């Protein structure tokens, strides 16, 4: 055996998983096809939003609270600042599912928040125009994460704790048998007891049988200059997610002092082959997000100064999949985070370590069970 466990793909989930396994003394190999902290998949683009009052469902709240503690642990272990909790504004029609889920999360778990409406809301946050059918909910346990530094911190910390990482090493095949699993990568083979596949949008390339379950989708991030950048500094401007029928505008305060992130992340398009991801941003895409910014964020200059393209793995119900792959003994899939996984990455790493070491976890992950909607 080359190691007890191998983790394939060291983006958000893989880096946190290898950190958690190494921390618990497991001998572990990691494989990443690009560099550590690369921006070729889902973990690039300067910031990721952290939210606790959760529009995707209140079942995530305990996991997110646990994730927050683990972000702080990783910061302590590495000395890097990764998560800034400057608050988060969720804006939308209270009759929508997203806002109802946020309110349910708040009620069930007594989350710190404020509800702002009408003039009171726009006086406090003049950076936004608000329609009469919308509310602003300020989630006090929200903010932003630095994704590249987070991945790098976890992977390097794992190495410090004894993990062996193979960079620029693409895994081409995984072959389980009764006694373990063989991995083929860069013309070499490696033998381990268990394999964890954290390949995100690339999952179906490595595991074609998962093509229907985890689909690659393309997301465009855009940044805009401000008329008065001071109004968009983290202390004055929370992260935000604004839902309306035809778009979902999400963003973060200025992190470099010159531009503000505001992107349309609604209904990302399918990417048939992740290795052929179109990283050009079309004029149509720019016009669409510019129009939304012009209408809703009067403090921004509506011509983007930066735009870049990423992709994530999506499932049919937008909840990820964690579990042993049917027919592949000792091979576990942890993928399909559907555009909202980064914030929870450290707790996912801890959950996977629990499952590998103890065969069970104290966290409720029923909604993430790999077998819930598999269609073979
Ligand atoms: C534009 C965008 C904005 C987002 N915004 C947010 C947000 O604000 N908040 C939030 O919580 N989440 C957000 N998400 C979602 C979040 O970033 C993802 O859900 C999360 O990063 C997925 O992690 P992952 O480990 O599954 O995939 P990734 O982070 O993409 O990692 C997969 C890794 O596997 C590697 N790999 C693939 N195949 C192989 C192979 N065969 N051999 C070796 N290595 C391989 C890849 O190179 C990659 O490094 C966003 C996603 C995108 C794309």
Image: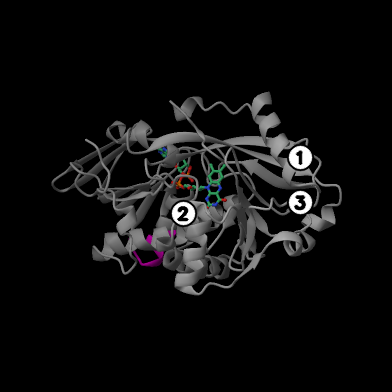
Identify the residue at image location x=52%, y=43%.
42
| Between discs 1 and 3, the one toward the N terminus | 3
Instruction: Using the rendered image of the protein, determine whether residue 282 is visible from the camera's viewpoint.
Output: no
Residue at label 1?
Answer: 294
Q: Is residue 338 above or below residue 309?
A: below
Asked if residue 293 lies left or right of residue 158, the reply is: right
Q: Which mark is residue 204?
A: none
Specify the quadrant of the image occupied by residue 191.
Answer: top left
Do the numbered discs 1 and 3 sit on residues whose CB atoms are within 8 Å?
no
| Between discs 3 and 2, the one toward the N terminus | 2
Do the numbered discs 2 and 1 sit on residues whose CB atoms are within 8 Å?
no
Residue at label 3?
Answer: 256
Give, as a single range, the part of the protein colored magenta.
19-26
Q: Quadrant of the C terminus?
A: top left
Residue at label 2?
Answer: 56
Q: Residues within 10 Å of mark 3 (few under 14, many from 20)?
A: few
| Between discs 2 and 1, the one toward the N terminus | 2
How far apart marks 2 and 1 lie (CA) works out to 27 Å
Residue 264, horizontal then vertical, whole percent:
62, 40
**Mark 3: which secondary structure?**
loop
Question: Which of the two discs, 3 and 2, sits closer to the camera?
Answer: 2
Residue 100, horizontal then vertical, whole percent:
49, 58
Q: Is residue 28 magenta?
A: no
């Amino acid at each position: 055996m080359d190691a007890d466990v191998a983790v394939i793909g060291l983006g958000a989930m893989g880096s946190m998983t290898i950190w958690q396994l190494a921390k618990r003394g497991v001998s572990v190999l990691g494989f990443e096809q690009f560099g550590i902290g690369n921006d070729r998949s889902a973990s690039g683009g300067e910031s990721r939003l952290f939210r606790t009052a959760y529009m995707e469902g209140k079942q995530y709240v305990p996991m997110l609270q646990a994730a927050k503690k683990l972000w702080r642990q990783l910061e302590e272990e590495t000395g890097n600042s990764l998560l800034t909790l400057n608050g988060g504004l969720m804006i939308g029609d209270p009759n929508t599912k997203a806002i109802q889920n946020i309110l349910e999360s708040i009620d069930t778990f007594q989350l710190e928040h404020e509800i702002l409406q009408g003039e009171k809301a726009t006086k406090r946050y003049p950076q936004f125009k608000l329609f009469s059918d919308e509310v602003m909910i300020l989630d006090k346990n929200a903010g932003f994460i630095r994704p590249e530094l987070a991945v790098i911190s976890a992977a390097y910390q794992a190495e410090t704790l004894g993990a062996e990482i193979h960079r620029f090493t693409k895994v081409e095949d995984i072959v389980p048998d009764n006694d373990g699993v063989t991995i083929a990568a860069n013309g070499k083979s490696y033998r381990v007891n268990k394999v964890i596949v954290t390949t995100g949008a690339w999952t179906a390339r490595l595991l074609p049988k998962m093509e229907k379950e985890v689909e690659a989708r393309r997301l465009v991030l855009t940044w805009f200059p401000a008329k008065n950048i001071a109004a968009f500094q983290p202390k004055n401007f929370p992260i935000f997610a604004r839902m309306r029928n035809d778009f979902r505008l999400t963003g973060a305060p200025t992190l470099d002092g010159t531009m503000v992130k505001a992107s349309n992340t609604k209904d990302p398009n399918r990417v048939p082959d992740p290795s052929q991801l179109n990283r050009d941003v079309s004029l149509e895409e720019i016009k669409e997000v510019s129009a939304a910014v012009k209408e809703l964020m009067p403090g921004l200059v509506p011509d983007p100064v930066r735009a870049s393209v990423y992709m994530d793995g999506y499932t049919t119900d937008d909840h990820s999949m964690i579990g042993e792959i049917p027919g592949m003994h000792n091979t576990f899939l942890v993928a399909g985070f559907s555009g909202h996984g980064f914030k929870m990455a450290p707790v996912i790493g801890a959950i996977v370590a629990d499952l590998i070491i103890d065969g069970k976890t104290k966290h409720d992950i029923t909604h993430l069970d790999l077998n819930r909607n598999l269609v073979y």
